[in-house]
Image (cartoon, rainbow, N blue to C red):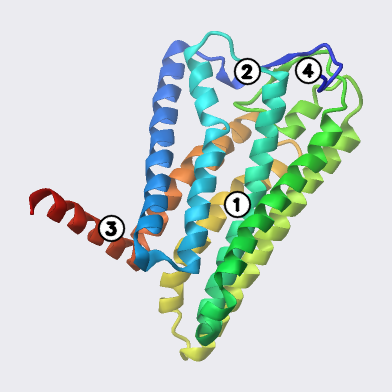
Amino acid sequence: MGGLNDSMVNEFVLLALSCSWEKRLFLILICSLLYLGVILGNLFILFLVIFDSQLHSPMYFLLANLSLIDVGLSSTTVPKIITDLLNEDKIIPFQSCMTQICFIHTIGGVEMVLLIAMAFDRCTAICKPLHYLKIMNPKICVSFVITGWVIGVIHAMSQFLFVIKLPFCGPNEVDSFYCDFPKIIKLACTDGAKLEFIVTANSGFMSMSTFFLLILSYSFILVTVWKRSSGDLSKAFVTLSSHITVVFLFFTPCMFLYVWPSPPPSLDKNLFIVDFAITPVLNPAIYTLRNKDIKVAIKRLLKKIFYSRFC
């Protein structure tokens, strides 16, 4: 076990991946297409922000980091799922399971902080436009990213240090596509009810508090715009719609998984697909289709490619 744990269990079986060959082929196709979309879409946004000087602003710096995080979040689970679907043995070693859990919670924590930073960015841009660049300076933007990683690591490690000490002597079957703290705690050879409550409360409180903070932030922005524009909220809705959509897509599965202590297995599996594959693949589309600056940047890129190739 490499010193991580003295229990007898050295691997877990992911039961959600045990199905008929036809269903496995379908899942392989869906997961592969979604993961390809995640990689191409988010790396395209990242490439666009890096190489288009017109997008060198605080909002797009945060968006580029969000795209990078979405790639990381999907990469913690989806490639492993595709590999397991191709193999007969649906197992994950104990160390790999713990590593996967830590990465999921670390990256999840970073994404929550980035979404808060993006809400703060929009709040500053709309409510204090004259002071926007002074408030959202490069130092503040980098601080948001660093803070996100620090909070993400603390969030993951605060649970990991408890779980890693639990004895695991069997059973070792997890009715899911991936490893997560609440699922693993139930397999411990001890009463893990208190620890399961602590872990669920930790992730649940972080998800709920961040979600409500974001909703309050965007509500404040809408009220501010409404007061300044004599009741016309159309411009604010256009500006904020992509951000609000992403918030709901990200937090809805999180709240079901961690606020609801024991969601039905079928719901848990469906929410997994939403959280780790569908949301990351939709984020680039949402920001691209609803963002004028991104559309203009894409046109500039296409023009450069056209002229460099044919002129």
Disc marking residue 2: 4
Q: Which residue is mark 3?
A: 298
Q: Amino acid at mark 3?
A: Ile
* Label whose residue precedes the other's in the sequence (3 or 1): 1
x 84%, y 22%: residue: 188
Q: Which is more foreground, mark 4 or mark 2?
A: 4
Q: Which quadrant does the C terminus fall into? A: bottom left
Q: Which amino acid, by three-letter code, is at mark 1?
A: Glu
> Which residue in the structure is indicated by mark 1?
111
Q: Residue at x 59, y 21 (%)?
A: 16
Closest to the observer: 143 or 5?
A: 143
Query: In the rendered structure, which amino acid carries the disc numbered 4?
Result: Gly
Helix, strand or loop at label 2? It is helix
Point out which mark residue 268 bears: none
Relative image position of residue 203 (x, y in whole percent) = 74, 46
Residue 222 at least partly seen = no
- The 10 Å Cα crowd at callout 1, few under 14, some 14 to 19, many 20 or more, is many
Residue at mark 1 to residue at mark 4: CA–CA distance: 31 Å
Residue at mark 2: 15
Gap between marks 3 and 1, in whole Å?
25 Å
Which quarter of the figure has residue 208? Answer: bottom right
Where, quadrant-wise, is the N terminus in this rendering?
top right
**Mark 3 burial class by Cα count in 10 Å: few <14, some 14-19, many 20+:** some
- Label 2 amino acid? Leu
Q: Nearer the viewer, residue 39 or 194?
A: 39
Q: Position of residue 56 (x, y in %)?
A: 42, 66
**Secondary structure type for disc 4:** loop
Mark 1 / mark 2, whichever is N-terminal = 2
